[in-house]
Image (cartoon, rainbow, N blue to C red):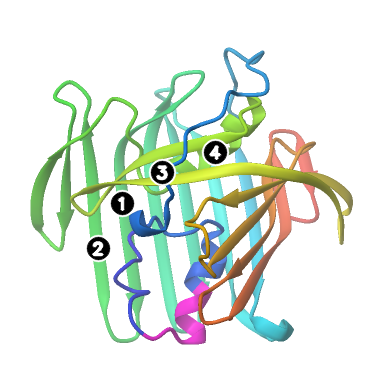
Amino acid sequence: MAVSTLLSGPLSRNRWLTLALIGFCIPTNAETPPEKESTPRAMSVLVQTLLPTRATYRATYRKGIPINGTATRVLEQQADGQWNYRFEVRSLMLDITETVRFEWTGRRVRPFFYTYDRDTWRTERHGTVAFDWDQLTVTNNIEDKPWHMAIPDDALDKLGYQLQLRMDLAAGQTTMTYRIADGGKLKENRFAVVGEETLRTEHGQVPTLIVERLVKPGSKRRSRLWMAKDWHFLLVQMLQKEIDGETYEIFLESASIGDLTIGQP
């Protein structure tokens, strides 16, 4: 999700469409407090199974102003047993496509190759991250300018960690830390379960876990995720509040997870 360049500086509504539809916050080291991970509430799920998934979202701007754009996430297994996870944003001013090809070990996402493509009416940006697990390195290549970086054995890409969050919630974890290979740096994102809530949605009553991004005390930035307990911890709603007071929300429109259908995909 190499959109930190896109989202730097003053933000227009069209730029914020990208953040609102991504569904998770952009990694920022300065916003992460040095907190210890808690003990998982349950670790009964030793081996987990991925299910093919497709989910579509819509977004709203502060005060409910509609944003003309949609986002789609698709998880598919390939013929060789590996998985492909794809994220797409389509709007009038901006198109973004992210993909990661990875192995699912039964408990963790192990990425092999991540791609990012952004097209606007003015510019294009393309990048890749290739993981070498034998050497514990990644090769970042942005606009044909490659460089290398050492990584730990639990490193993730900027798309795969979002799937890992769902699976960790399913395994009963309540505090999660992800180390993400991003732009020549290793960044950390921390999340914690802060409660439960049953949402009233167009799909009916949806029991959810409430997950928040951990930030420094006093920070005005807030990111809250509602993950559906009965739908394999799929993201169904997100609230994003920025330091300037702007508020953005995304809502699940439809999804299919294995044999489960929500709405009309």
Label 4 sits on a secondary structure element that is helix
Numbered disc in front, either 2 or 4: 4
Badges 1 and 2: C-beta atoms under 8 Å apart?
yes
Which badge, 1 or 3, comes first in the chain's sequence?
Answer: 3
Q: Residues within 10 Å of mark 4 (few under 14, many from 20)?
A: many
Q: Is residue 228 left or right of residue 153?
A: right
Q: Which residues are magenta?
A: 10-17
Disc 1 marks a residue whose amino acid type is Thr
Residue at 34% in and 69% down? 118
Residue 157 position (above or below residue 150): below
Q: CA distance from mark 4 to mark 3?
A: 19 Å
Q: Is residue 135 left or right of residue 22?
A: left
Rounded to the nearest whole Å, what is the CA distance between mark 2 and mark 3? 33 Å
The correct choice, above or below, for 80 with respect to 66 in the image is: above
- The residue where tag 1 is placed is 115
User: Which residue in the structure is indicated by mark 4?
Assistant: 165
| Type of amino acid under label 4 | Leu
* x 14%, y 41%: residue: 149
Q: Position of residue 151 (x, y in %)?
A: 22, 33
N-terminal-most mark, 1 or 2: 1
* Residue 191 x %, y %: 54, 44
Residue at x 62% of width, y 81% of height: 67
Q: Read off the residue under disc 2.
A: 126
